[in-house]
Image (spheres, rainbow, N blue to C red):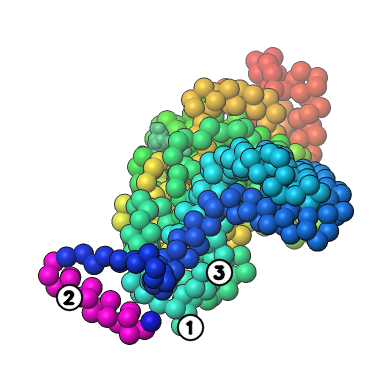
């Protein structure tokens, strides 16, 4: 036979040299040549999934025939066995991977039909009456759902694609890498590979375009990720047949009611939520204009405003364009450089006061609660702040370095967080949560996400639609694409209105600190010496009323009242409360007081 095959190969080569296609000629009396046997075996193997229904029918036929000959009384065993198996599949099929109810009922129906036909064949004979025709009809009827089943067809096509992996791996420069498992999911499929000795996940990441070409997918369909066990010599390949982020994903509403819970920013490609904890963390959001940063901030605002243990301050130097719709939920909104400067100065005062309070009370961290809320400062376009209010750099720096323990947190958005744009301080390096929307240049990946992230596969420059982002944080150390939920303008307006009533106020410690800071900031130099205003150093209450009577329309800061009377802050507040109850003084604004009727005093 082998000399015959050699002869055939020589003949085929000769035909090809003459420009002809070789043809296998089979003599009716001859044994089938090896080649044909191999071709048939390969075809059967290749189409084994499609051939499963007739193969099952043939097996049943042979079993029925042989058992009828040897054990015709066994028919009831087949019947009972099939009934039990059908019930198990119908009710517990989920445990063997039949996740959909329709799949479970189908499997149960197949087992029941096969079992009853087999029982009849064992008892009566496989060729009895219409039994062969019945078997054929059942094969066709029950075969149709099998042949048309989407997931089965997808799995088969994946298996066929992956059968070529040994050649693909050589062609793309990952020789020796081996397929371990493959699973079809809603969006496409994923497979786990073992790498050859010395190959790394970074090598596989660098080969993504080559893998896409070899598998014949569309551009951008392939992701390379570490496996769950985080082994350095394995990787997971995800291939998307449909982009799960193809359409905008409407915001389903807030995912949290406290900052102690992780906020859901939008789904990853496998439909799991990109949840991130902001408690005692600073966040940096970057990406080119139009990449969806403001959309991302909207998702954050929708969630933060639902938290009763968060007070939100915001800086939006684009005249409040982005954050204005949330104004009813924002405790303080700075839209000018001067307002921003004061706001950040006050935030540092809050930070200091909270730190002193923690130290005095032997506590390590500020646990946010509705009475003692976290203070989250959202800054849209940080670069404008750095440029227009450069004197605030030391304040943002202090907050970035020392704000975590006292829950005074920054969330900054900017297009390119260069050192210059971030105010040259420690702000960028202190950002614990990084969200990168699309960047224009590859090097901007490292700018937003941190040094070395581009090389590690964080390819934010390949994000291809607004709202798509990569999330980097201690609990998110793998570059998985996510897409932020989209809040329509009406949703923002409705949510802001809904949450406005439940916003908490700052705690007394923070409020007092702000009043002190503002008194320090605004103490005018031309105000007469407090003692001379008071005129009566022996009677602090009279001195207090004298200062309040002479107060300007915008009121006198508490700090001045302290200086005028020489009394402590609690004493001042106690007297102010007392006089306010009697209608003698009035609070003009936070920390500023004057006499109710200044002319009658
Ligand atoms: N999550 C999202 N899903 C779908 N579309 C989005 C999403 N986020 C933003 N978009 C679309 O992209 C457009 C630009 O988004 P956005 O204004 O948030 O970008 P930006 O990065 O803040 O830009 P800029 O820096 O100019 O303010 C929006 O008008 C919106 O149509």
Residue placed under numbered mark 1 in the picture? 197
Q: Report whether residue 449 is seen.
A: no
- Separation (CA) of disc 2 from disc 1: 43 Å
Q: Is 15 one of the magenta-colored residues? A: yes
Q: Is 182 one of the magenta-colored residues? A: no
- Check whether the beta carbons of the residues at disc 2 and disc 3 lie within 8 A of each other: no
Residue placed under numbered mark 2 in the picture? 14
Q: Where in the figure is residue 293, as x and y percent of width and height?
A: 44, 42
Residue placed under numbered mark 3 in the picture? 180
Q: What element carries label 2?
A: helix
Pick whichever of labels 2 and 3 is earlier in the sequence: 2
- Check whether the beta carbons of the residues at disc 1 and disc 3 lie within 8 A of each other: no
Foreground pick, 488 / 594: 488
Does 101 sit above or below residue 472? above
Q: Where in the figure is residue 22, as x and y percent of width and height?
A: 24, 67
Q: What stretch is highlighted in magenta?
A: 2-19
Number of on-image labels: 3
Q: Where in the figure is residue 263, as x and y percent of width and height?
A: 62, 45
Which one is in front in this view, the residue at disc 2 or the one at disc 1?
Answer: 2
Q: In this view, does 557 lie to the left or right of 89?
A: left
Ligand 1 position by quadrant: top left
Q: Report whether residue 245 is seen.
A: yes
Q: Where in the figure is residue 431, as x and y percent of width and height?
A: 52, 57
Which residue is located at x 75 percent, y 39 percent? 370
- Separation (CA) of disc 2 from disc 3: 42 Å
Which residue is located at x 54 percent, y 27 percent? 492
Residue, far front: 29
């Amino acid at each position: 036979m082998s000399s015959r095959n050699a002869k055939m190969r020589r003949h085929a080569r000769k035909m090809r040299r003459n420009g002809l296609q070789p043809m296998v000629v089979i003599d009716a009396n001859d044994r089938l040549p090896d080649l044909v046997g191999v071709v048939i075996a390969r075809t059967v193997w290749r189409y084994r999934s499609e051939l499963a229904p007739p193969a099952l029918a043939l097996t049943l036929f042979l079993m029925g025939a042989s058992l009828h000959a040897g054990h015709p009384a066994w028919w009831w065993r087949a019947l009972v066995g099939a009934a039990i198996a059908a019930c198990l599949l119908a009710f517990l099929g989920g445990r063997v991977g039949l996740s959909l109810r329709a799949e479970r009922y189908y499997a149960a129906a197949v087992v029941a039909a096969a079992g009853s036909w087999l029982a009849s064949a064992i008892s009566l004979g496989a060729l009895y009456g219409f039994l062969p025709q019945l078997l054929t009809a059942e094969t066709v009827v029950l075969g149709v759902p099998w042949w048309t089943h989407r997931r089965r067809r997808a799995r088969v096509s994946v298996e066929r694609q992956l059968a070529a992996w040994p050649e693909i791996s050589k062609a793309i420069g990952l020789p020796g890498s081996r397929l371990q498992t493959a699973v079809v999911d809603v969006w496409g499929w994923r497979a786990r590979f073992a790498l050859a000795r010395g190959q790394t996940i970074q090598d596989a990441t660098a080969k993504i375009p080559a893998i896409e070409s070899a598998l014949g997918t569309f551009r951008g369909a392939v992701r390379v990720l570490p496996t769950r066990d985080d082994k350095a010599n394995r990787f997971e390949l995800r291939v998307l047949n449909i982009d799960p982020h193809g359409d905008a994903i409407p915001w389903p509403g807030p995912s949290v009611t406290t900052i102690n819970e992780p906020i859901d920013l939008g789904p990853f490609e496998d439909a799991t939520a990109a949840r991130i904890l902001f408690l005692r963390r600073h966040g940096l959001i970057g990406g080119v204009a139009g990449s969806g940063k403001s959309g991302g901030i909207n998702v954050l605002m929708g969630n933060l405003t639902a938290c009763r243990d968060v007070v939100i301050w915001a800086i939006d130097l684009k005249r409040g364009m982005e954050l204005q719709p949330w104004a009813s939920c924002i405790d303080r909104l700075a839209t000018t450089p001067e307002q921003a400067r004061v706001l950040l100065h006050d935030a540092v005062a809050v930070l200091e006061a909270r730190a002193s309070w923690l130290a005095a009370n032997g506590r390590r961290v500020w646990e946010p609660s509705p009475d003692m809320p976290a203070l989250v400062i959202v800054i849209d376009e940080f670069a404008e702040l750095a440029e227009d209010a450069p004197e605030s750099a030391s304040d943002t720096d202090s907050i970035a370095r020392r704000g975590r323990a006292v829950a005074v947190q920054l969330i900054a958005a900017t297009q390119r967080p260069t050192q210059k744009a971030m105010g040259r301080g420690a702000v960028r390096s202190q950002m614990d949560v990084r969200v990168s929307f699309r960047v224009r240049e590859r090097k901007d990946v490292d700018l937003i996400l941190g040094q070395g992230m581009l090389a590690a596969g964080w390819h934010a420059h390949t994000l291809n639609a607004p709202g798509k982002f990569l999330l980097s944080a201690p609990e998110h150390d793998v570059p998985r694409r996510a897409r932020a939920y989209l809040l329509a303008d009406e949703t923002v307006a409705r949510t802001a209105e809904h949450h406005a009533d439940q916003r908490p106020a700052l705690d007394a410690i923070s409020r007092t600190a702000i009043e002190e800071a503002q008194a320090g900031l605004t103490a005018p130099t031309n105000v007469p010496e407090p003692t001379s205003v008071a005129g009566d150093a022996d009677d602090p209450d009279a001195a207090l009323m004298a200062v309040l009577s002479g107060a300007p329309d915008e009121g006198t800061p508490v700090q001045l009242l302290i200086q005028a009377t020489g009394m402590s802050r609690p004493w001042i507040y106690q007297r102010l409360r007392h006089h306010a109850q009697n209608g003698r003084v009035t609070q003009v604004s936070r920390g500023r007081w004057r006499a109710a009727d200044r002319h009658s005093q």
